[in-house]
Amino acid sequence: MNYLRNAWTQAAWANEIQPGQLLARTLLDEPLVLFRDAQGRPQALHDRCPHRFAPLSMGRLCDAGAAVQCPYHGLRFDGSGACVHNPHGDGRIPAAAKVRSHPLVERHGALWIWMGDAALADPALIPDFGFNDPEHWAVGTGTMVVDAPYELEIDNILDLSHIEFMHPLFASEAVRRAEVRCEHEGDTVWCKRFMADDREVPDFLRQAFQVPEGAIDRWLHVRWQAPAVMALWAGGVAHGRPPEQGIVSQQAHCFTPVSASQTLYFYSISFPKLMGPLAQALADESVQALRAPFEHEDKPIVEAVGRRMAGASLFELKPVLLAGDAAAVRARRLLQAAIDKEHA
C-alpha cells in the first residue's frame, strides 16, 4: 500500500492516553505503542522489541513513565526508542537495542503522528483544528473503525449530496440542489455547498439552528488536507439574514489508514465554552447523535463499496462522474501526486 508518510495524521484523541497506560494501535500497516513519558509528553514507538520481537504494548511503563519495559525479557526503552536498561548479564546495552520512534505532538485535543522522515516533521504543518482546543471549546469526540480504504471516506465527506438519500436525520432535497463550489488553495481543497431558501429542513436541524419555522439558508463547507484530514462547518440562519447571525456546527472528520482495507475514523463536534455549563453536555449529546448515522448509514455503504471494488483503485474502474465529484477527484489527484513525489 502506498501511503503518504511525510504528513501529520491523527493517531488518537489526546484523552485516549492516560499517564501510566500503554495504547496499542496500528497505523499505515505499522504496529505502534503510544504512551506518555515522565513529563506527560506523548511518545510513539514501533511495537516490537528488537530482542525476541514481543509487543512492547504488552509490557508496562517503568520509572514514572520514563521507559517501556518489554514483557518478555525486561529490556526497557525510552521515548526516543533507545534501550536504557538491560537486566541481564553485566547490564551492557547492545548497540542494536533500539526501537524506531515517530514524532508525536499533542495539539487541538488530538495526537498527531508523522510516520515518515522525522527530520521533516515540522509541528507548524499540523492542520488547524482550533475549534477543538479544550481551553475555549467544549468538544465531543468519537472514534470508529471502518473496514474500507480511507480514500473512500475522502469521497464520502467531500460529496455530501448523499445526505438526501442516506441520512433521514439531516435529509433535505436542498442539499442535492445546492450551489456547489470546489476551491483549491495550495495543498487544501474546499467543497462549499450553499442551500438557499430551504423549506424542507428536518426538525433536528431546525432545533440546532434555532429557526422553528420558515425557510432557512444553510451551508456545508468541507476542508480537505492530505492525507485525509478534514473539517466541516455546517451552518444555518433564517432565510434572508446574514450568515454571521446564524449558528455553525464545527466538526472534525479525520481518517487514518490502519491498512489497505481498514480505516480509523476520528470525529468531533464542538461548541464555545462561552455558552456556559451546558456547552459540554450539548457537545456530548451531539456527538452521540452523529454516531448513529455514521455507524448505521455511512459505514455500511462505504464498506460495501470497498468490497465491490475488490482492491481496485477508483480510476482503474473508470467511475461515472457527477457534478458533485469535483472536490473529491481534486483531492485524490493531489494526494496521489504527493505520494508519487515522496516515493520519487
Image: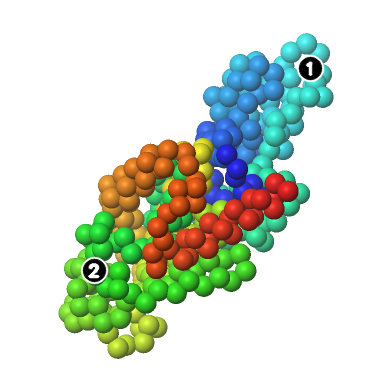
Give me the residue at 57% from left, 66% from top: 188
Is residue 234 something one can see in this rendering?
yes
Image position, residue 319 (x, y; %): 42, 54
Vertical position of residue 210 compared to residue 293: above or below: below
Which residue is label 1 attached to?
A: 91
Q: In what element is the residue under mark 2?
A: loop
Vertical position of residue 14 compared to residue 178: above or below: above
Closer to us: 24 or 311: 311
Closer to us: 32 or 178: 178
| The disc label shown at residue 172, or none | 2
Image position, residue 40 (x, y; %): 61, 45
Look at label 1 and name its amino acid: Gly
Q: Tell me: 133 left or right of 43.
A: left
Label 2 crowd (10 A; few <14 / some 14-19 / many >=20): many
Q: Tell me: 109 left or right of 145.
A: right
Q: How is the image coloured?
A: rainbow
Look at label 2 and name its amino acid: Ser
Label 1 crowd (10 A; few <14 / some 14-19 / many >=20): few
